[in-house]
Image: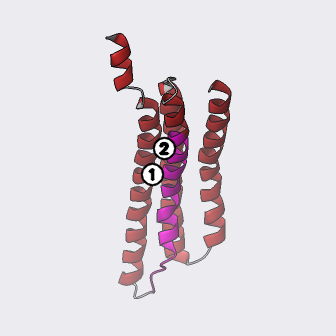
Amino acid sequence: MENNMLMQFKDLGAILVLALAAVGSGCGAGIAGMAAIGAWKKNFAQNKAASFMLVVFVAAPLTQTVYGMIVMRQLMAIANKGQYLWSIGAFAGLAIGLSALWQGKCAACACDAMGETDKGFGNYLVVLGMTETVALLVMAFTLMLLGIVA
């Protein structure tokens, strides 16, 4: 009975890493998207051209879902061998998701600034890259840990 109960949850860590990363991506992109819409509205109200480049900022948090998927695949491979690493999936997913959320907040500021000045695209992208680096490091270190544990 107990083993059967565990089998129902064998993929929980894998689902958690993907789901938490995706929730962060969705929230981050949503926050940045609202800022882009606001910046475009201001541009239209002033009869200025609206920069399509703001879409780059809005899309930036979406990559964290891919990082969650990469970790998910490795967790699934380990789960199929009988090891259930729920906490690794949960905490890695949380860290990746929070990176996406904060990247979205930074992207929202970038949308506001670029929408108003039409300058600084490269600078803003560097900041988004720094917040993205957290997710990349979490993914890399989690994969390294999984290689040791498995």
| Residue range highlighted in magenta | 49-73
Instruction: Give the percent coordinates (x, y) of residue 11.
Output: 42, 31
Q: Would residue 106 appear left or right of 127 to someone viewing this image?
A: left
Is residue 16 something that shows in the picture? yes
| Relative height, residue 43 to residue 77 (above, below) | below
Residue at 63 percent across and 25 percent down: it is: 149
Residue 77 location, x and y as percent? 53, 35
- Corner quadrant of residue 78: top right
| Position in image of residue 19 (x %, y %) | 41, 42
36 vs 142: above or below: below
Where's residue 58, x and y in %? 47, 64
**Residue at 45%, 86% in the rendered image:** 49
Q: Amino acid at mark 2?
A: Gly
Residue 121 is left or right of residue 19, and the answer is right
**Considering depth in this image, is 29 or 65 the residue closer to the camera?**
65
Q: Which residue is mark 1?
A: 25
Decide which of 99, 109 is in the foreground and name it.
Answer: 99
* Rendered residue at 49%/29% (across/down): 79
Q: Which residue is mark 2?
A: 97
Looking at the rendered image, the quarter that the C terminus falls into is: top right
Asked if marks 1 and 2 touch (Cβ < 8 Å), the reply is yes
